[in-house]
Amino acid sequence: MESWERSRRRWQHAFFASWLVLTSAGPVMEDGRPLPVVLVAGLAAWYAVWFVLRTPAAGDVPLPYVLGGGLLWLGLFAVDSSFLVVGLSVLVPYCMDAVRVGVVAVVACAGGWLWHRYHASGAIFWTEVVICALIAISAATAVGYFHSVAQQSAERKRLFDELQAAQEARAAAERQAGVAAERQRLARDIHDSLTQGFASVVMLLEAAQATLPDNRHLSQALRVTRENLAESRRVVRALRPGDLDECGLPEALRRLSGRLCDETGAEAQTVITGSPRPLEAGVQAELLRVAQEAVANARRHARAERVTLTLSYMEDLVVLDVHDDGGGFDPGRAASGHGLSIMRERMEQLGGTLLVESAPGAGATVVASLPAGAPGGAR
């Protein structure tokens, strides 16, 4: 795309230089004075300042350039009205991006030159009309060609941007698939090695404790091993949410609220609003983990009697809302809590947000929102 833009600029420079030379050479030689030469050179230098020494974007024609070029052209026209057609060179940058401007400028300059000849001599010879028409047709053809080159460049750039976006989306999807596969592999390896090993050690220690029930060191070893077994299982669940392997996010949330009801006796329910639609596996996993953490907080700390999980499918967002009527807390003091920090990091990694609304004695609400098209690459 840069080569196309450079080519477009080269064509523009060539068009400007050729038109300036062709339209000013004759009047300059006929006039014979140095002032027209200085003004033509000034017009060329003014163009170089704005379009050679700097590279404005396509279609960007600075107003100071037009004003300065127009003043130089008016100076030429004041010296000799034969320089009327030179004014088209000032509009060359416009002609490259707007063919109608170029054609109008060509026709206007050609008509102005014929009017000038008629005003100067009182008549127009057919040779002058033919020459003027040929120049106008050649200039209009050049304007159309240069405009088509600019249009092709813009179209190629658009296609290139679309291709690049598609390649980036494909690469992101492949990375997400790779991350998901690696998480599944780690979960299997931990389950098949560490978790099974801890389970075997627990069984052996329980058997040993039955033989030596009063051994303090044996009891401590059994306790530590059970804690590590529970931790390894938690890691496996975090790497691979089992509910999502069997069903989608809405059903996984219903199971979560159902387990809370069965295990604590609290009134828990899951509400789904909007039209459910497929989400990236990583997005579902992160929302489920936020729900699990929020429910665990309501269970352990808030002693809530009612918990409501609401999953809302909006046009551009997917929002998870977990509300409990427990004891509440001060979000300012709990902002640095490990659980809230992890939930907030999970959402921010996917371009989402996490809001916590609570007050002592007023329950708590955790709101996690993600863009509907958020990439699902979880860590």
Image (spheres, rainbow, N blue to C red):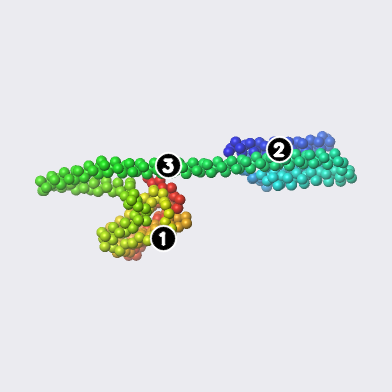
Q: Quadrant of residue 334?
A: bottom left
Q: Secondary structure at mark 3?
A: helix
Classify 10 Å Cα crowding around label 3: few (below 14), some (14-19), many (20 and above). few
In the picture, measured across the screen, residue 19 lies left or right of residue 289, that is: right
How far is the residue under mark 3 from the one under mark 2? Answer: 48 Å
Check disc 2 and give the amino acid type: Phe
Q: Report the disc number at residue 273.
A: 1
Q: List the residue tagged with mark 3.
A: 174
How far is the residue under mark 1 from the one under mark 3? Answer: 31 Å
Check disc 3 and give the amino acid type: Glu
- Residue 226 picture location, percent across and down: 21, 48
Residue at 80%, 41% in the rendered image: 133
- Residue 223 picture location, percent across and down: 19, 48
- Residue 86 picture location, percent across and down: 76, 41
| First along the sequence among labels 1 and 3 | 3
- Residue 95 picture location, percent across and down: 69, 43
Classify 10 Å Cα crowding around label 2: few (below 14), some (14-19), many (20 and above). many
**Vertical comparison of 257 with 239: above or below:** below
Q: Secondary structure at mark 1?
A: strand
| First along the sequence among labels 3 and 2 | 2
Q: Note whether residue 75 is visible.
A: no
How far is the residue under mark 2 from the one under mark 1? Answer: 62 Å
In the picture, measured across the screen, residue 98 lies left or right of residue 194, that is: right
- Count of numbered tags: 3
In the picture, measured across the screen, residue 358 lies left or right of residue 37, that is: left
Q: List the residue tagged with mark 2.
A: 15
**Vertical comparison of 76 with 309: above or below:** above
**Vertical comparison of 18 with 62: above or below:** above
Judge by depth and name the residue closer to the eye, 77 or 311: 311
Q: Note whether residue 269 is visible.
A: yes
